Image (spheres, rainbow, N blue to C red):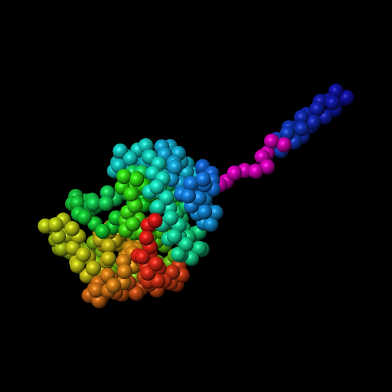
Amino acid sequence: MKTKYGILLLVCWLFFGSACNESDLTPEFIYNGPIPAIADGPSEAQKICYELYQKYDHHVYYTLSGDDALRTNVGTTQTNMIEYNYPDALPLEAADEDTAGAFLKLLRDFYAALPEAIVKTTVIKRQVLIKENIWYDNLSEYVGYYGMMVSTPNLSIGDIDEAQQGIVYWGGMDDDIGPQPELWKYSIAISFFKTRTSSYYVNDMPSPDAFIQVSKGKYFSEMSYEEQDEAMMNMVNWETEEWNMDYIRSLGFVDPYAFFMLASDYSPNEDMATYAAWIACTPLEDRQEILDNYPLVKKRYDLTLEYYKEYLKVDLEEFCKFWVNKTVE
C-alpha cells in the first residue's frame, strides 16, 4: 500500500510541478504591434511613419523590399495580379528616401485635415511605399472585354486591390521620377474615400440611395444590348481614343470608371467616392461649368456633399480649398 501511495504522490508531484513550470515559461509581454516594429527616426521620413503609427495606428513603411514588403501582420500579400500585370515589379523594391519623404509629408497633411476619428477607422492600415508603380500605368487603361485601350483621368498609384484589404502599395516612389503633386493628391484622396466609405470594407456607411437613383439604369452594365452598342459608339472619341466626357457627364458620371465598371447595386459608395475625389482635387471654378451644364452631375454633386457632411463630418468644398492649394515639399 505504501508503495502505491508513494507512486500516486509522485505522479501528483510531477503533474503539478509540470503545470507550474509551464506557467513559469509564459512570457510577461506578447508583442502585437506592426511587423516590423516602427521606430521613431532617425530620418525625417521615418519620423513621419512613427507619427502616423502613434496617432492613427497606421503601419507605414518606405524601407521594405522583397519578402519583407509582402509580409503583413496576418500573412503574406497575394502577388497574382502583380505577377500578371507588372512582372518586372517583383521582387518589390523599397522606395527612394527623398521621394518617399515628400509623399509622406503630403499623406500626413491629408490626414491632419480630416476628422481624426475617420482616419483612425479607415480599413487602410498597412501602407508600403515602393519604387515600381503596380497600379495604373499613368497613360491608359484597358477597358473590359471589348479590348480597347483608352486614356483615362482615373489615374492612381495606390493599389488597393480587393485581395489585399487593408493594404496599400504606393508606387512610383523613385527619385528619377520625383514628386508628382497632382497624381499624388488624387491618388491619396480616391484611395482613402473609396476604402473609408465602401460597404465592401466597412459596415458603418449606409448605401447612398438617393445618389444611386439619379443614374440608375444609366450604368453601362444596366443598359440593354442595343443601348450598350450605342454607348460604345458614344463613350469614346475613336479618333483620339479618349473618353467622351460630354457623354459620360450627361449620364451623371464624373469618372468613366464608375460608368463602365460599377452599377447601382454594385459598389455605389465607390461611385460616390469618385465624386468626392473630383471635388477635393478640382477647384470649384474649374468644376462650375460642368455643374451648370450637366444637371445629373449637379444632383449627384449636391448629394455627395450632403452625404459626406452627415456621415464623415467632412465639408468637401472646404477641404478642396486646402487640398488643391497644398504644395509638395
Question: In the rendered structure, does residue 29 fall within the stretch colored magenta?
Answer: yes
Magenta stretch mostly in which secondary structure?
loop
* In the rendered image, the vertical position of residue 201 relative to residue 76, given as above or below: below
Q: How many marks?
A: 0
Quadrant containing the C terminus in the rendered view? bottom left
**Pick the front one: 262 or 297:** 297
Quadrant containing the N terminus in the rendered view? top right
x and y, in percent, of residue 97 in the image: 41, 45
Question: In the rendered structure, does residue 200 fall within the stretch colored magenta?
Answer: no
**Is residue 144 something that shows in the picture?**
no
**Pick the front one: 329 or 275:** 329
Identify the residue at image location x=30%, y=38%. 88
x and y, in percent, of residue 41 in the image: 52, 47
Tell me where residue 304 sits by quadrant. Answer: bottom left
Q: Which residues are magenta?
A: 24-34
**Pick the front one: 273 or 266:** 273
x and y, in percent, of residue 249 in the image: 23, 68
x and y, in percent, of residue 307 in the image: 40, 71
Identify the residue at image location x=36%, y=44%. 131
Tell me where residue 327 sits by quadrant. Answer: bottom left
Identify the residue at image location x=56%, y=47%. 33
Left of 119 or right of it: where is 246?
left
